[in-house]
Image (cartoon, rainbow, N blue to C red):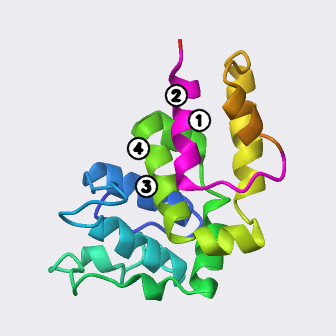
C-alpha cells in the first residue's frame, strides 16, 4: 500500500487491502500471541467491521501514533460488527492475496478473522459457503484431494473456523 489514497472505484476490497497492508508491515498474525496479541491486525479488523477501509483518509494506522490507543477488547466485536466484517471478506481477491502474500499469511489472515467472528459465523454462515467453494476450486485445480479430513471439511454446510485452515494449508502445499 502506498501513502497515496486510492479512489473508491480504484481501490481493492477492504479485506484485500488490509491483508496487503499487514503483509507489507509484517504485522503479527499469531492468534494467541503473548507479546502483542496481534494488536495491529485486531485493530484493522475492527476498523473494517465498523466500515473503514485502509485507503480511507482517517484509517487508524495512518496516524502518527500508529493508532495505538491501547489494546482493543474483544467486546468491540459485537454481532453487528462481526456480520459486517464477514461480509466484507467475501469480495476479497484471494488469488491476488495468495500470489502476493503467500498461502500461510493469507490463510492466517482468514484465520484471525474467523477467530474474532466465530460466534456470528456459526449463527449466520456468511463466509463458510464462500470458503468451501473457493477451497474446492483451488484444490481441484491442483489435482484433487488425498486427505480424508479435508474432504470432510469441503462438504457444503461445514462451518469454518480458524483451526480448519491448517488442514487446507497442508493440502495446498503438498507436492
Kindly report the distance in space between the C-alpha atoms of the residues bearing marks 2 and 4: 13 Å
Residue density around tag 2, few if under 14, some if 14–19, many if 20 or more, within 10 Å? some
Give yes or no for residue 105 being in the magenta stretch. no
Residue density around tag 3, few if under 14, some if 14–19, many if 20 or more, within 10 Å? many
Tag 3 near tag 2, CB within 8 Å: no
Closer to us: 95 or 78: 78
Q: Position of residue 141 (x, y in %)?
A: 72, 22
According to the image, label 4 marks what residue?
105
Q: Earlier in the sequence, mark 3 or mark 1?
A: 3
As drawn, is 80 to the left or to the right of 130? left
Q: Which residue is found at the position 58% from the left and 73% from the top?
A: 85
Q: Which residue is found at the position 22% from the left and 63% from the top?
A: 34
Q: Position of residue 9 (x, y in %)?
A: 60, 66
The magenta segment is: 156-174
Tag 2 near tag 4, CB within 8 Å: no
Kindly report the distance in space between the C-alpha atoms of the residues bearing marks 3 and 2: 21 Å
Q: Quadrant of the N terminus?
A: bottom left
- Report the mark closest to the observer, 3 or 2: 2
- Report the mark closest to the observer, 2 or 4: 2
Please tell me whether mark 4 sits on a helix, a strand or a loop: helix
According to the image, label 3 marks what residue?
19
Please tell me whether mark 1 sits on a helix, a strand or a loop: helix
Q: Which residue is found at the position 53% from the left and 11% from the top?
A: 175
Closer to us: 116 or 101: 116
Q: Position of residue 94 (x, y in %)?
A: 58, 45
Residue density around tag 4, few if under 14, some if 14–19, many if 20 or more, within 10 Å? many
Task: Indicate the quadrant where residue 82 lies.
Answer: bottom right
Please tell me whether mark 2 sits on a helix, a strand or a loop: helix
Q: Name the disc covering residue 168, or none.
A: 1
Q: Earlier in the sequence, mark 4 or mark 3?
A: 3
Tag 4 near tag 3, CB within 8 Å: yes
Amino acid at each position: 500500500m502506498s501513502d497515496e489514497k486510492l479512489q473508491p472505484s480504484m481501490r481493492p476490497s477492504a479485506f484485500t487491502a488490509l491483508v496487503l497492508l499487514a503483509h507489507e508491515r509484517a504485522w503479527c498474525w499469531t492468534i494467541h500471541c503473548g507479546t502483542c496479541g496481534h494488536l495491529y491486525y485486531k485493530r484493522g479488523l475492527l476498523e473494517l467491521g465498523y466500515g473503514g477501509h485502509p485507503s480511507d483518509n482517517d484509517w487508524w494506522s495512518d496516524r502518527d501514533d500508529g493508532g495505538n490507543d491501547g489494546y482493543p477488547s474483544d467486546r468491540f466485536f459485537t454481532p453487528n460488527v462481526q456480520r459486517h466484517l464477514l461480509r466484507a471478506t467475501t469480495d476479497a481477491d484471494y488469488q491476488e492475496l495468495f500470489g502476493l502474500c503467500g498461502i500461510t499469511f493469507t490463510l492466517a489472515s482468514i484465520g484471525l478473522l474467523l477467530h474474532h467472528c466465530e460466534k456470528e459465523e456459526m449463527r449466520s454462515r456468511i463466509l463458510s459457503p464462500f470458503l468451501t467453494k473457493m477451497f474446492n476450486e483451488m484444490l481441484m485445480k491442483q489435482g484433487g484431494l488425498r486427505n480424508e479430513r479435508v474432504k470432510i471439511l469441503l462438504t457444503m454446510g461445514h462451518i469454518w473456523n480458524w483451526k480448519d485452515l491448517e488442514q487446507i494449508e497442508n493440502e495446498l502445499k503438498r507436492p
